[in-house]
Image (cartoon, rainbow, N blue to C red):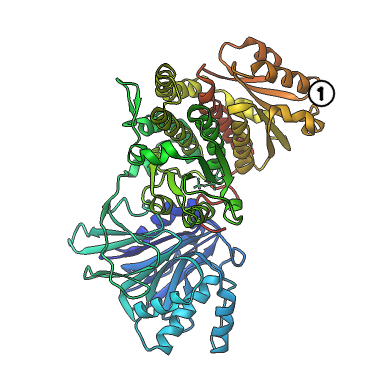
Amino acid sequence: MCGIVGYIGDQEAYPILIKGLHRLEYRGYDSAGISLINNKGELNVYKAKGKVSALEKSVEGKDISGTIGIAHTRWATHGEPNTTNAHPHFSQSKNLSLVHNGIIENYKPLRTELEKNGMTFCSETDTEVLVQLVEFMMVSHKCDLYNAVQLALKNVVGAYAIAILEKSHPDQIVCARKGSPLIIGVGKDKTSGRPEFYIGSDATPIIEYTNQVIYLNDEEIAIMNRAGLLDITNLSNVKQTPQLVTLQMNLDQLEKGGYPHFMLKEIWEQPDALRTCIRGRIDKAEKDVLLSGIIDHRDKFINCRRIIICACGTSWHSALIGKYFIEEACQIPVEVEYASEFRYRNPVIHPDDIVIAVSQSGETADTLAAIQLAKEKGAFLYGICNVIGSSIPRATHSGTYLHVGPEIGVASTKAFTGQVITLCLLGLAIAKEKKTLSNEMFHMLVDELQQIPDKIQWTLENNKNIDQFAQMFTYCKNFIYLGRGYNYPVALEGALKLKEISYIHAEGYPAAEMKHGPIALIDEEMPVVVIAPKHGMYEKVVSNIQEIKSRKGKIISVITEDDTVVKNMSDYSFVIPDTRDCFVPLLAVIPLQLLSYYVAIAKGRNVDQPRNLAKSVTVE
Ligand code: M6R
């Protein structure tokens, strides 16, 4: 939540910062702001409510010159989304401007203390407290900005990624992080060859200019200047040695590539993204699975007594599918926990438990806190994340990246299928070591998993008319999604997708639970999406469909391509090719992603930036 971007070098900062804000807008779009120091040494701050485009309009005709600046796109926590609460925030003397991502939990007592010392506040934000505290430290301790930041942060409880400009020192930026991500890009100006630095909440605003980055660690403070100096220390003033990392990302992955929305691009990208996810992890010739994270910790996995998977939202849904697969393939009990609940219980954890965190962003605050708790209790931690270098992979003992490429659309699509495939690969790798599957079954599953990207391509090609069909459902106030076994989590995921981008109320249920209550909701107005592939509980799902039909509910089914029985019972059907029961979710979710996309489009919603949501939920 909230995106930060910064620049210092020889180029004009404004275009770099605005482009960076557009790339980070998925993190929040309640307001945006920018701060620049011009060549007269003036520190300017411009802010606007709403999206980055509103900020661009608001600065027309204003002085946006300067080769140093910081900028911010906000997802509101403390204080409503308006211009006053937008970042950057000035300190009282207007010598400092600061942007912040995170939450300062003790901002109230800090504010009271600062007010007692004569400081006045303009906004309701925790962030303004931070910038005032830094200024207070500079004045009361007669120290420079860098030391004042160290002193201030020692008094702060909570999470932060910050970047600060100082009017009286226009050649430097100071930044710091704890609990919220911050990356420094190290580049060279193309014309002058002189050093330049970039700051970003993630790599997306940086990759266009340099692929050399430093991931700031928790409680580290960095200072960078035009002469190319970059110093990093921790809160106790101990010098840190920065590690330069080369980003494996290209710019095309951050563009829409001809699609109207990132979400649609990411849906259609799934075959290729999943081929990359599988690449190097399946030995096609040997029909074998090679996951280094398991090979390196073989004994842990063989001897583990229980697996607990912590996740939120869509990642929680993929974790449920992972549970079913791992229990079936490895005979290890698996519990799936909402990270936000797990972290505030006192969960029983044994040293021979493995705790897996599943997270696209690798930054979700609740998931991060859940694994920190599990670590304190002695568990072995494994991360399944997409964003390379993010906080969760850095906090776990081992793990696997999804490698599905950056996911920009707020509604998760390719990360979901990437997570399901990765959890299946994990289950297969453990099963191989534990010998809980016959060789024949193991090879059959590996072989089938390899074919999934092609089958997703088939599913996309054969459900192209969902856009016309979706128009009919824009009037609906409610939807029900039903599935059984492996497809129950798909029902949950289909309902979540519809809710978050079309704002239509939708619920997912295990199909057999209908008769225990939800069936009372069924009438001719209620569309019911049933995932009904020709597998395991097919006959039972057919009975569930009959029950709905006899109450006049409208049936939208996801069926195996040659299934005329359910097709004839349905008002509309989406087809998927046949696959193993355990891999059906990877295909069945595709038409549901498309359905939610096209219903939202027909309702005129902002699909990539739905209201009230942000891509990375880095606050609780
Ligand atoms: O980055 P994470 O996977 O940890 O994010 C978890 C949820 O916030 C996320 O899946 C959310 O539910 C998505 N908007 C769903 O589309």
Q: Residue at x 47, y 69 (%)?
A: 88
Residue located 45% across and 81% down the image: 94
Question: Nearest the camera: 425 or 268?
Answer: 425
Label 1 CB sits under 8 Å from any ligand 1 atom: no
Q: Nearer the viewer, residue 256 or 565?
A: 565
Dot 1 falls on a residue whose secondary structure is loop
Instruction: Determine if residue 210 is in view.
Output: no
User: Is 211 on the left-hand or right-hand side of 438?
Assistant: left
Which quadrant of the structure image shows residue 20?
bottom left
Which image quarter is the C terminus in?
A: bottom right
Please give the residue where the numbered disc 1 appears in the rendered image: 551
Is residue 289 visible to the viewer in this orientation of the structure?
yes
Say left or right for 161 vs 338. left
> In this picture, is 175 found above or below 270?
below
Q: Is residue 122 above or below residue 310?
A: below
* Residue in front for this viewpoint, 405 or 362: 362
* Residue 425 percent coordinates (x, y): 42, 31
| Labels in figure, total | 1
Q: Determine whether, in the image, residue 159 is placed left or right of residue 293.
A: right
Query: Which amino acid is tagged 1?
Result: Arg
Front in this rendered view, residue 41 or 195: 195
**Residue 75 in the image: x percent, y percent?**
54, 58
